[in-house]
């Protein structure tokens, strides 16, 4: 049912969001176990790939929820200069916030940004024009940016590393690195 190509695609998808390769591999394995055990719950077979990606995203969220205590300990260490952990936490928050967008924009951003599917392919999948999809992605990004600015104050360095993240954060990243 699941091809080697899809396995590699999911492994890359999870690997972009979970820096520890062993943890990423465990998440992908858990996804395949869930897919196999819950396959009978899928009502529309043509939505299999989207369903698998939803399970994958939820598994990544579960991973970060389990890591919440460990992340708080890392952030509490003032001499920690590993910006990657902090950047990952903000990326996690962004991923969660994408789920709050209206359906057309959420779907477009999830496929374009999280699944790294080319926009032309997404347009075909959704049955809209390429320019229409580009507009959806652009509007979705703008909505996401406004939501992020409203909820968090995020400051980055020139390389995109998160230096400061303040606000009401569900993932506990309320710490500043300087």
Image (cartoon, helix red, strand yellow):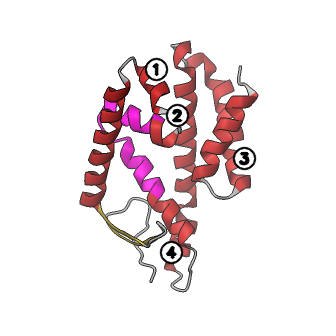
Q: Which mark is residue 125?
A: 1
Q: Mark 3 or mark 2: which comes first in sequence?
A: 3
Q: Mark 3 or mark 4: which comes first in sequence?
A: 3
Please provide the residue range marked out in magenta.
91-111
Gap between marks 4 and 2 measured at Cα: 33 Å
Give the residue at x 50% y 79%: 76
Give the residue at x 71% y 34%: 7
Element carrying mark 2: loop
Q: Mark 4 or mark 2: which comes first in sequence?
A: 4
Q: Position of residue 70 (x, y in %)?
A: 58, 67
Gap between marks 1 and 4 measured at Cα: 41 Å
Q: Is residue 81 visible?
A: yes
> In front of the other: label 3 or label 2?
2
The answer to which image quadrant residue 30 occupies is top right
Element carrying mark 3: helix
Judged left or right of residue 63, residue 150 is left
Work out which residue is located at the far bottom of the displayed protein and give it.
79
Residue for badge 2: 117
Residues at marks 1 and 2 touching, judged by CB atoms closer than 8 Å: yes
Which quadrant, please, contains the C terminus? bottom left
Judge the density around disc 4: few (<14), some (14-19), many (≥20) Cα neighbours within 10 Å.
Answer: some
Q: Mark 1 or mark 4: which comes first in sequence?
A: 4
Residues at marks 3 and 1 touching, judged by CB atoms closer than 8 Å: no
Residue for badge 4: 75
Q: Mark 3 or mark 1: which comes first in sequence?
A: 3
Work out which residue is located at the far front of the displayed protein and give it.
131
Judge the density around disc 3: few (<14), some (14-19), many (≥20) Cα neighbours within 10 Å.
Answer: some
Q: Position of residue 150 (x, y in %)?
A: 24, 58
> In front of the other: label 1 or label 4?
1
Q: Is residue 22 magenta?
A: no
């Amino acid at each position: 049912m699941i091809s080697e190509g899809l396995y590699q695609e999911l492994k890359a998808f999870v690997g972009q969001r979970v820096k520890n390769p062993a943890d990423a591999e465990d998440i992908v394995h858990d996804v395949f176990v869930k897919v196999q055990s819950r396959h009978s719950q899928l009502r529309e077979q043509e939505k299999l790939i989207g369903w698998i990606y939803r399970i994958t995203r939820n598994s990544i969220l579960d991973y970060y929820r389990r890591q919440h205590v460990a992340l708080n300990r890392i952030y509490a260490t003032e001499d920690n200069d590993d910006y990657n952990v902090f950047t990952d936490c903000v990326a996690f928050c962004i991923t969660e916030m994408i789920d709050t967008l209206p359906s057309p924009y959420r779907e477009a951003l999830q496929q374009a940004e999280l699944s790294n599917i080319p926009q032309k392919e997404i347009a075909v999948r959704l049955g809209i024009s390429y320019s229409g999809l580009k507009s959806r992605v652009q509007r979705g990004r703008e909505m996401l940016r406004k939501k992020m600015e409203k909820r968090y104050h995020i400051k980055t360095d020139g390389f995109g590393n998160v230096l400061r993240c303040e606000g009401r954060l569900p993932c506990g990243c309320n710490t500043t690195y300087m």
